[in-house]
Amino acid sequence: MRWILPVFLGTACGVAIFGGSQGEGSSGIEYPTTRTVDQVDVLHGKPVADPYRWLEEMDSAETMAWVAAENKVTSDYINGLHQRRRIQSRLEKLWDYERFGTLTKVGKRYVYSRNDGLEDQSVLLIADSLEGEPSVLLDPNKLSVDGTISLAWTRFSREGRFMAYAVSSGGSDWVEIRVRDLDKEADLPDRVQWVKFSRAEWAPDSSGFFYSRFPKPVQGKSLSAPNIGQQVCFHALGTDEADDLVILEAPKDKPDERYGIDISEDGFWAIQSKSWRSKDNALLYRRFTSAKDLAAGEWKTLFAPGVARYRFRGNDGPMFYVQTDQAAPKGRVISVDVTAKDGVEPETLIPEASDTLRGVSIIADRFVCNYLKDARSSLRIHALDGSYENNIVLPMPGTASGIRGRRSDKEGFFSFSSFTSPRTAFRYDFEAGRATVFRKPRVDFDPDRFVTRQVWYASKDGTRIPMFLVHRKGIAKTADHPTLIHGYGGFNISQTPRFSIAQLVWMEMGGIYAVANLRGGGEYGKAWHVAGTKLKKQNVFDDFIAAAEFLILEGWTSRQKLAIQGGSNGGLLVGACMTQRPDLYAACLPAVGVMDMLRFHKFTIGHAWVGDYGSPDDAEQFEALYRYSPLHNLREGTIYPATLVTTADHDDRVVPAHSYKFIARLQACQAGPSPVLLRVETRSGHGAGTPTSKRMAQIADKWAFLADNLGMSLPADF
């Protein structure tokens, strides 16, 4: 295993010279001509060319014309793939099943989402009882004619009368908050705009809610301008958003400082979480009397910044319960008396375990702890003194999520899924100690035809990495199995077993689906995460490369049958691995990827990723970023795998300019026969809220692309 230092063809001063994409590639595809400019940045004394800088003007007429031309080339190619229609048909058939979201108890009523199968957006339902006939609370499909306005989140007031909800247009992270009166079944006139990365936190008396917003962007820059200068505000019901009270605001010397406010369930305390360019956070608190008082009064520091991650989980009066990784990389639960004298140490209630603590809720006067054991969920219940009571029995190895309930409830709700079991909604009775199914989807496939196994392999430095393999039963180890490896490896995010129609169709096509649990994720706690960040980011790529080499060495597949995929940070992963080891894969699917590691921090929320990636403004970190930045490590005259780069024109998380510049450079560099294409979805964003119809079309295109470039023939029973 190896990784390749950047090789540039240029002048003696070291400026990288990037050629334009012109004429017909060696694949026979006529790529659009991409203009280059003489843009050179001197970074820490090193000249770095950026000849496709103009593609960062994503709304310019020239860029949009270029995108249209790229999309046409890709569309012509995809439409010529004879197996695509069968793949699309199978996706539509399997996707057409009734599915449900996790229950939420709202006052004495129950709210959950439902999709009849092919609806673009799931519908929010409300019922008076678990057995009662639900009525429609909100149907996002009626908010737009093309299904591109989605429901981003909901938050209910404490007595259950009001619902604050956020709608996103075209997949953007920007949302507008609206308020619905559940008793009157009608919206209030309240509207709050320019909200991002925030939820509503209701005041105890339901007079209004706290939320976070950013300044209104300059005209035409809403999808690319840096998101700095955050404010935490209070919106009083029945007032104009212009009159919202500012509670907290990022200082001018730290414009990317971020805040969040929680109000304790008893309504007596306000808790502030504060962070700045860090994975860790500070926790502050004060008594809650009114929003106006919060804006004027001083906060007391409970835990200082830069030491660990702290999450307020509940309280008994001044006794706070906090989940933290301080002195416990895999997590623990502590209690701290905020009235105690300085120097009094917090008490450990639930000590660090061998498994990773991912979440804690207080329901029915108990801690419900969500652990990961080798990337599989384990739900454990503890008394409030920390003593262990029992486990919630799960159906099989898989993923439990959305554990909801209040401290005064006697029931809680969660969802569970695995690679071969669709998301099922459960109710847990704390008095009986038993979980029962509320709604279980029926999908037109036989799960017994498939098998899931977990294997372990060694990375470049000897670290053992787990990986899931899912495929049809009964297949033998042979090098001709088409295999798709999925990876992420960042931001403390864990890759766990989840059901997906896309994965299922891939396996029905005869493919092996693999999920590698790379460093940088959260599967094994803070140490595992940190081992894949900043100057150690190369570990993540080494882990992914080693996964591919392992599957080939073990006889599951071959280089000619191997593909890799990942989105967002996973798109960076694919971009880095295909530039470091272009010989190892037959096809690559980088989606909405971070491809320019020298400029990622200049767009939207990119500055917040410095905690994981490091900063290009730091000389040492710049060198590390430069060594693996996908855009800057593409080399002319190299044979690259077949590549389908996907992004969306409304992606304001990872702006599409990353993908635009990467594919332009890749098309200029490609010396091999394989196609390197760009697919840009319109009226879509980073992924959340994408209409069902668009999602199916995207997957059909990807799977048809893989089938063509891995030499796959669909089975007779497909």
Image (spheres, rainbow, N blue to C red):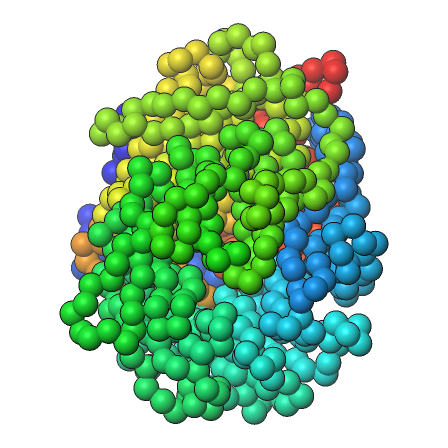
Q: Residue 256: percent from the left, percent from the top?
A: 36, 72
Residue 46 relative to residue 599: left or right? left
Residue 388 lies in quadrant: top left
Q: Is residue 398 above or below residue 632?
A: above
Give the residue displayed 31% in from the left and 58% down from the top.
334
Q: Residue furthest left?
A: 343
Residue 504 lies in quadrant: top right
- Indicate the quadrant containing the N terminus: top left, top right, bottom left or bottom right: top left
Q: Nearer the viewer, residue 29 or 74?
A: 74
Whether residue 55 is visible: no
Q: Nearer the viewer, residue 465 or 227?
A: 465
Whether residue 261 is visible: yes
Give the residue displayed 48% in from the left and 87% down from the top.
290
Q: Residue 261: percent from the left, percent from the top?
A: 44, 73
- Indicate the quadrant containing the C terminus: top left, top right, bottom left or bottom right: top right
Q: Nearer the viewer, residue 206 or 647?
A: 206
Residue 71 relative to residue 598: left or right? right
Q: Nearer the viewer, residue 363 or 568?
A: 363
Q: Residue furthest front?
A: 431
So how many labels did they put on this image? Answer: 0
Q: Residue 668: percent from the left, percent from the top?
A: 45, 41
Q: Residue 200: percent from the left, percent from the top?
A: 55, 72
Give the residue displayed 48% in from the left and 58% down from the top.
365
